[in-house]
Image (cartoon, rainbow, N blue to C red):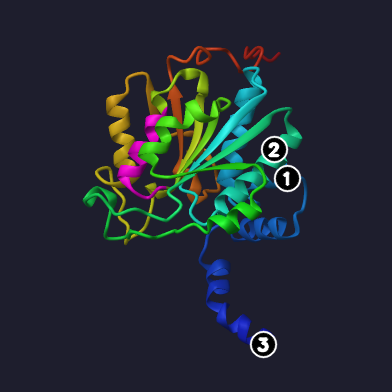
Amino acid sequence: MQNPFKVFKKHLSWILREIFLEPFTIRRFSIFFIKYFKIGSYEARLSYGAVDRPHYGYCIKQAVKLATSLGYDRISVLEFGVAGGRGILYLEYHAKEIEKIYNIKIDIYGFDTGYGLPEPKGYRDLPYIWKKGFFEMNHYRLNQRIKRTQLILGEISETISSFVKEYNPAPIGAMFYDMDYYSSTSSSLKIFNNDEKYFLPRIFSYFDDTIGDEASLYNEFTGERLAINEFNMNKTDIKIAKPYYFHHKSFTQKWYCQIWLIHLFNHKDYNKYISFDNKQMNLRE
């Protein structure tokens, strides 16, 4: 058993930084305790960001809210880049909790090579931070733990073209991209070559590798950001755009910057009214 004093000393610098240097110290520690002790309902904890992978829960919940307002009773959620599978297990957790709140079913699909990253295809795949074989999957172990996910293994350029025909998925409402490479992300976006019936009119999405740090140096000309930009240039009726409502929040979380919305402007339900019954504000006496 570790000496508690040594453990405390080891983390002392982190504790001092969190207390004296980081903004919103009280909020950060409150969220930690709410998350650790699971205080309150799942929906409340999700709204605080006091859950594991809150961006997963956020995108699924928003997709479900949109789907139910449009009369759908089932949606699909996709993750591109399963790797070890921790993300898929969190997706299953959030889907299970959200199904308890809304009268809807959520299907989960996970795409991966099964053997880790392939060989980078030039500078756009950022070979200075990614290597062939990174994020290899333990397929046997993951299969023992997943409960509702269908894993789709193989090169994404091949599996994405047959996905709709083979699985006939419910309309896709949330998508999570963690494929690291420009080439893989670009191939995965070809899913939108399929009929609109396989999608909600607006899809809540998370692109993991769009912020980065001083080593990755993500930009508009490489990686996931390049794949997004090229998609937007080549598509006239579907666009991947940033939401702006996060900007007014008093407390910022990193994942806010990694949320993107995919708009299918020609979708039959895109213009269907889903807002309040009446927004008229009466004059006060």
Q: CA distance from mark 3 to mark 2?
A: 41 Å
Please state the horizontal and vertical placement of residue 68, each as a whole percent of the image: 66, 23
Q: Which residue is mark 1?
A: 42
What's the magenta bit mostly, secondary-structure-wise?
A: helix
Nearer to me, 244 or 98: 98
Magenta residues span 179-191
Q: Is residue 198 positioned above or below 135 on the image?
A: above
Please state the horizontal and vertical placement of residue 104, each as a whole percent of the image: 70, 28
The quarter of the image holding the N terminus is bottom right
Nearer to me, 146 or 180: 146
Which structural element holds mark 1?
helix
Q: Is residue 178 positioned above or below 30 on the image?
A: above
Q: Is residue 32 left or right of residue 159?
A: right
Q: Amino acid at mark 3?
A: Asn
Q: Which residue is mark 2?
A: 98
Nearer to me, 88 or 115: 115
Q: Earlier in the sequence, mark 1 or mark 2?
A: 1
Name the image quarter holding residue 3: bottom right
For residue 34: magenta?
Answer: no
Contact (CB < 8 A) between labels 3 and 2?
no
Q: Residue at x 69, y 56 (%)?
A: 35
Nearer to me, 197 or 116: 116
Please state the horizontal and vertical placement of residue 80, each as a whole percent of the image: 46, 43
Q: Is residue 209 left or right of residue 254?
A: left
Please state the horizontal and vertical placement of residue 183, each as a whole percent of the image: 30, 43
Q: Can you tell which mark lies on residue 3?
A: 3
Which structural element holds mark 3?
loop
